[in-house]
Image: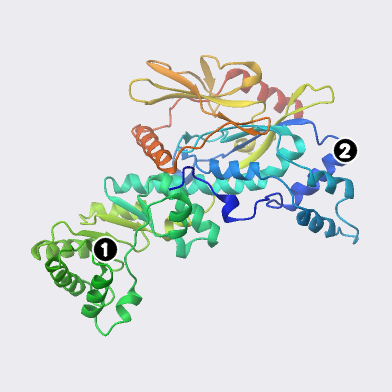
Amino acid sequence: MPATASHLPQIYRPAFGLLTDLYQLTMAAGYYDQRIHERKAIFHLFYRKAPFGGDFALAAGLPLAIDLIRNLHFSADDVQYLGRLQGATGKPLFREPFLNYLQRLKFRGTVHAVPEGEIVLPHEPLLRIEGTLLECQLLETALLTVLNFSTLIATKAARIKAAAGEDEVLEFGLRRAQGIDGGLTASRSAYIGGCDATSNVWAGRYYGIPVKGTHAHSWVMAFPSEDAAFAAYAAAMPDNGIFLVDTYDTLEGVRKAVATGKRLREQGHELLGIRLDSGDLAALSISARQILDEGGFPAAKIVASDSLDEYAIKELKGRGARIDVWGIGTRLATSADQPALGGVYKLAAIQNAAGEWEPRIKLSDTAIKTSNPGKLNVKYYYDRRDGYPLSRVIYNEFTGEPANELVRENGAVSTVEKTNGEARDLLVPVFTDGVLVFAPPTLASTRDRALMNWKIWSARASYAAFPAGLDPRLHALKEELRTASA
């Protein structure tokens, strides 16, 4: 069983320098030419709007990001490839001194991050990277790739698991995922968010996720009759007797599964259940439950699949569906109702020629797109008795600990709620001067943490008035830079 949650160098190539957009490399080349490439800089990775119309997201993907950062380098073949690229005039796009620099590149910076399984609000940094301007710039695309998608799918899975309640949830999305890596990352993230198992054997192999599955319609269709198909599957998998019953007539299929279950029982095995994959799942599950109970199999589970998500689960439960296990595929693995998180990566501070830190801000006519300057962290206040969230404050470490007030996104000033509270910084050290100082927990323990946090944060009826925002000094700095740039 894997001890940690990431194995990117085993799955892919060991050098990730080229996992980037071309403009990151052209900017890096420009920094090098201007001799500012070794200036220290601070970047933050964050999202602006909570996904799925919710209030928060579930952080995921940090071990993948760690692998990318540790393997930020360029092989000799990579450098040769870049040397062959041409600009608009047909001349080499990159000069030889810059290419030689890339071949020696190794990450030497400092990273703070939100651990997987934590709740993250809009504008709060999931990741803070402090290093040379060039190395920070080259990490942007790769880090957004893994953290955006991982966080999105983990959040979607948490919503699905919350809708399912105590029912088992299986992730079945590989065949509809966006490519091989999309399927692998989706399985990993879905497990963090609360799925109990996956059909993805590759994810089981590399991440230690429990794997489960039944059989497809093709199995039934490969035999002369449904009876013969169920009997053959029972012979092949006597202790994995879950039968897909909707290839032909669904309720007749349930009856045949019961008959097969009785033969299994005579042989010392037990019918585990049936799977419904089409039709009116609520009505069919109610009828199937009656057939199973009357046939002597009250413990047999009813598994349902067919384009399910949190909305469909709530609707089916509202209609009294007798479904025990939910198989979630396309709408989870592709996050069908919101296919991207929209996380961004922004420069927030840079050292000048004298080595002094200067804050930076990205302005926009759209208020939500104006970034926060400085060296950011998030102070999280929570009830020491039950972990209930009290307040969240984004603050600038350059100016010290946050005050007792905060400025909300709409400009309103609120008191930081601390009653019965404990406080901690949300960002924790991951790399210090290029050295990894964080040991990712097991994926199973990360999942436990995520489920606990999601339950705690979901217990609050509304977050419209939740005291979260900027430390007043950070807000003042932001306004100062906004005014100076106007």
Determine the residue positioned at 84% across, 22% down. 354
At x 83%, y 34%, the residue is 36
Circle 2 crowding by C-alpha within 10 Å: few under 14, some 14–19, many from 20:
few
Relative vertical location of residue 110 with respect to residue 52 in this rendering, above or below: above
Give coordinates of residue 109: x percent, y percent. Answer: 69, 33
Q: Amino acid at mark 2?
A: Gln
Residue 220 vs 467, above or below: the answer is below
Q: Quadrant of the C terminus?
A: top right
Residue at numbered disc 2: 34
Between the residue at mark 2 and the residue at mark 1, the CA separation in whole angstroms equals 65 Å
Q: Mark 2 and 1 residues: CB-CB less than 8 Å, in contact?
A: no
The one nearer the camera, 236 or 78, is 236
Residue pictured at 46% horizontal, 35% vertical: 118
Q: Quadrant of residue 165?
A: top left
Foreground pick, 49 / 88 = 88
In the rendered image, which quarter is residue 386 located in? top left
Tell me the quarter of the picture where residue 356 sits: top right
Q: Position of residue 296 (x, y in %)?
A: 9, 63
Q: Amino acid at mark 1?
A: Asn
Is residue 439 rendered to the left or right of residue 294?
A: right
Q: Nearer the viewer, mark 2 or mark 1?
A: 1
Can I make out residue 336 in this image?
no
Q: Is residue 333 above or below residue 453?
A: below
Q: Residue at 33% x, 74% y: name it.
A: 217
Label 1 packing within 10 angstroms: few (<14), some (14-19), many (20+): some
Is residue 412 rendered to the left or right of residue 330?
A: right
SS of the residue at dot 1? loop
Q: Nearer the viewer, residue 258 or 53?
A: 258
Q: Looking at this view, is 238 or 140 the one in front?
A: 238
The circle drawn on residue 240 is 1
